[in-house]
Amino acid sequence: MLNRRVGSGWRCWGVFLIGLQYIEHRETKQECTVKSYVDSLNVKWVRGRAIDRGEIDVGTQQSQAIPPGLFWRFHMTVHHPTYVKFNLSLSHNALLGIYGRRNIPPTHTQFDFVKLLDGKALPRSLTDPVSSAKTPKGLLLSGLQETGFIEYMDPGTWHLALYNDGRNLEQVLLHSTPIDSMDGCSTDCNGNGECVAGHCHCFAGFLGPDYSCPVLCSGNGMYEKGRCVCLPGWKGAECNVEEGQCIDPTCSNHGNCIQGICICSPAYKGVNCEQVDCADPQCSGHGVCVRGECVCSAGWAGVSCDDPLPACQEQCSGHGTYLPESDTCACQPNWTGPDCYTELCPVPCGSHGVCSEGQCQCEEGWIGAACDQRACHPRCEEHGQCHDGTCICQPGWEGEHCNIGEPRLSASRTAPRPKH
């Protein structure tokens, strides 16, 4: 009786374990199925992977929403040597890297050409140049900005990859167009413009004093009226210095760089401490600082114009006649003062200069016989005339400093082909 119970107990346990294994296997299978389905939905959104469009034809228009941190890849076949123009539409906040490589897909470090585009550096478009008839269904183009570039391509399969380095999903519209030649323009407009009748027509975001469409302002600013207007976070003449750094890290060896600002040593001034300053920039209130030296007013002397000069009225400084009955000096023409020490200037020097030896010595930044006109940049003298701080350009010149000339025709030539 005992043996029968024991045998029945083992059979019950066996049935129980088989049932438990079946239930566990079924739950595991369902979990794997759900996980596999979720993974399939997330393939395009995992940072580091790519969206592969496959092959496209030159001359077609493509669009894609690129998630942050992903490549949009495709390739095109070029049958004969040609230039290809790429027109792009992207948002104001876009940060896009465009890589190209012949016969092999490009990477961040291996490519035949690369273009780095910052939407903030492009002028905002008032209207969308792409007609609604050509706009891919579902792609919103409002607020997009236009730019482009041109690349010379040898025959072969060209692989292109557009990388979204921004933080948001980026909608990009790209249109490729073959171009017969770029002959007639110097440097082929650096690939940043189209050559039309010997003139470079620059794409948005590119310009230049010689109209060759170079990459200006280091890609971190806008070129306006002959100078770079830097984007937030950048500074310097070419917008190539980050805000937290000094333009000259050494501060001309006359100061210390602290959080992007040069703190100058005594007797130096300027953004980079490159200008000699007076020991007392106010010259004790008795003169003006000119090129690092105090030019003192009449009756004062010393490095900082803080030493009063004794009056020797009997001599009248050699510029007058002493009158003992009144104990005064009768000064000669063009001389004044109690002792005829001060030479008169033809006009008053105003608040931005002092009269010294018959001429007004002006403070820095001021010019004119009476020190009443603001100075211009030295480059203004080449092709313009300074008028109270404004450079009036000669015919054929423009820009803030009159340094931008009319477009010049370049000798027709064939551009050198890149080697692959």
Image: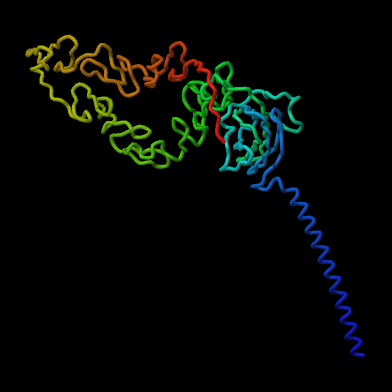
Q: Is residue 413 left or right of residue 146?
A: left
- Residue closest to the far bottom: 1
Tell me which residue sits at (10%, 21%) in the image. 312
Q: Nearer the viewer, residue 364 or 217?
A: 217
Say which quarter of the image contains residue 302.
Answer: top left
What percent of the width, then of the height, locates residue 269?
A: 33, 33
Residue 293 seen in this snapshot = yes
Q: Is residue 49 left or right of residue 3?
A: left
What percent of the width, then of the height, locates residue 163?
A: 62, 40
What percent of the width, then of the height, locates residue 384?
A: 41, 14
Q: Is residue 339 left or right of residue 388?
A: left
Tell me which residue sits at (18%, 14%) in the image. 336
In the rendered image, the vertical position of residue 209 relative to residue 332, given as above or below? below
Tell me which residue sits at (64%, 40%) in the image. 168
Q: Is residue 298 left or right of residue 124?
A: left
Q: How is the image coloured?
A: rainbow
Say which quarter of the image contains residue 372.
Answer: top left
Say which quarter of the image contains residue 254.
Answer: top left
Quick one: quadrant of the N terminus?
bottom right
Tell me which residue sits at (82%, 65%) in the image. 25
Q: Nearer the viewer, residue 159 or 269?
A: 159
What percent of the width, then of the height, locates residue 252?
A: 33, 36
- Residue closest to the far top: 333
Residue 146 seen in this snapshot = no
Q: Nearer the viewer, residue 206 or 413?
A: 413
Quick one: quadrant of the C terminus?
top right
In the rendered image, the vertical position of residue 343 relative to residue 142, given as above or below? above
* Number of numbered discs overlaid on the protein picture: 0
